[in-house]
Amino acid sequence: MAKAIMLQGTGSDVGKTVLVAGLCRAAKKRGLKVRPFKPQNMSNNAAVADIPGDNNHGGGEIGRAQWLQAIACGVAPSVHMNPVLLKPQTDVGAQVIVQGKVFGEARARDYQALKGRLMDAVLDSWGKVGEDADLVIVEGAGSPAEINLRSRDIANMGFATRANVPVVLVGDIDRGGVIASVAGTHLILPEEDRRMIVGYLINKFRGDVSLFDDGLKAIEKFTGWRCFGVVPWLKAAARLPSEDSVVLERLVSGGKRALKVAVPMLGRIANFDDLDPLKAEPQVEVVFVPQGKPLPADAGLVVIPGSKSTIGDLLKFRENGWDRDIAVHRKRGGHVVGICGGFQMLGRVVRDPDGIEGSVKEAEGLGLLDIETVMEPEKTVRNVSARSVQFALPLEGYEIHLGRTTGPDTMRPSAIINGVEDGAVSTDGKVLGTYMHGLFGADGFRGKFLESLGVKGGGIDYRADVERALDDVAAELETHLDCDAIFGLAR
């Protein structure tokens, strides 16, 4: 079994995902065979990963964070890197994915009782991930300080103690109160859990790090833990795909550019990193529009992203008045792209006769495409290679969706996937829908698509820029952390 080290946070969104990715890349550069692992994740940003031994069903779902971390390791992602994935569908319930496949649905209270049964799957995947590795770097979820959930925990100390993996605690100084959060975690953890922590690091520091010397002394006084370093605000992290939709609330517009792309922030938005390649374009300004705010009148393109709850988000779309905004946008000659759930919303109606998404069985669509969608139980999960019909250029991405879409506008497909027509295009060519995520990641297509909107695009190798960003993050961690000590404490 490979040696392992685990990063847990004093809270959510302290930067564990990027730190694990950076450490994975740093270990790879040292010549180690390294793998990522996250026992339990909660995200509607999913990726398609291999299911070892299954050659018939295309793939399974994991969090996109583990997909990114696998890239950092230079290996293909596997469903065993994230054996339990929760995809929120309502405020109190989520779809449960186990080792890549739908396990069922559970309300929050029911899931707490279910977690004990899932530990076997977590430990099974844990064994498989480490089979051919020198080092596994594990990412926790939330915080081990949530001691009210400790008895059934599979994500933090529940896993670390069962698998005997030492833990580095991550504190986020940017949010404030980092001394209290680290010392408070030490104070309330039971002794068995506290013994698993071999030290801590401070993340997201801005300014002169020497000003925090007294803070480090205070933490050492309260905890006795060693500090592995203070990580500055990692600018390169902005060039990496984000997993948690909480980051959308903090995105700041980069200033006026040639093309403004408006993206409504759906309540159950999914796979919003589809927009990252557009954000990387110098002439493109991507604006995520929060609920309660109108779509900007000067947007040349509206992109409706994926959704974990198409009907629920479609109803909220109307409540926000975005249906009226997008109708006005179309009258002005504006373009619209719908991806996956967003594609389904563009049609005349979405039907869910079996109540797969909830109690609402039917919702009127936006009527921008002459199509209709019927939800069906079987989920399509696969990586795909395709071609754009409009530009006859290669595309590459993935599908994760329920539902079958038909109608006259599907006779004008947006892409050909494995010889099969996908998506739909309006008669004037200005509204495009597709089930394929990753559409804008194809550099050639993205450049031609932007040219068709009157904007100079292309010239960017988006995937290569992600690789460079991972290298940059790894270099920063090597500079500011005692990586030798962290890797040396793995067991």
Image (cartoon, rainbow, N blue to C red):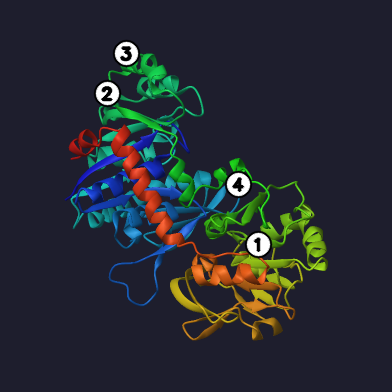
**Which residue bears the numbered disc 3?**
221
**Which residue bears the numbered disc 4?**
91
Image location of residue 98, percent across then percent down = 39, 58
Q: SS for tag 4?
A: loop
Q: CA distance from mark 4 to mark 2?
A: 39 Å
As drawn, 359 above or below 189: below
Res. 434 image quadrant? bottom right
Q: CA distance from mark 2 to mark 3?
A: 10 Å
| Identity of the residue drawn at 78% across and 68% down | 333
Q: SS for tag 1?
A: strand
Q: CA distance from mark 3 to mark 1?
A: 52 Å
Locate the C terminus and report the quarter of the image it occupies: top left
Q: SS for tag 3?
A: helix
**Which residue bears the numbered disc 1?**
303
Q: CA distance from mark 3 to mark 4?
A: 40 Å
| Numbered disc in front, either 3 or 1 | 1
Mark 4 near mark 1, Cβ–Cβ under 8 Å? no
| Numbered disc in front, either 3 or 4 | 3
Q: SS for tag 2?
A: loop
Amino acid type, residue under disc 3 in the picture: Lys
Q: CA distance from mark 2 to mark 1?
A: 47 Å
| Numbered disc in front, either 4 or 1 | 1
Q: Residues within 10 Å of mark 2 (few under 14, many from 20)?
A: some
The mark nearer the N terminus, 4 or 1, is: 4
Q: Is residue 373 visible?
A: yes
**Which residue bears the numbered disc 2?**
226
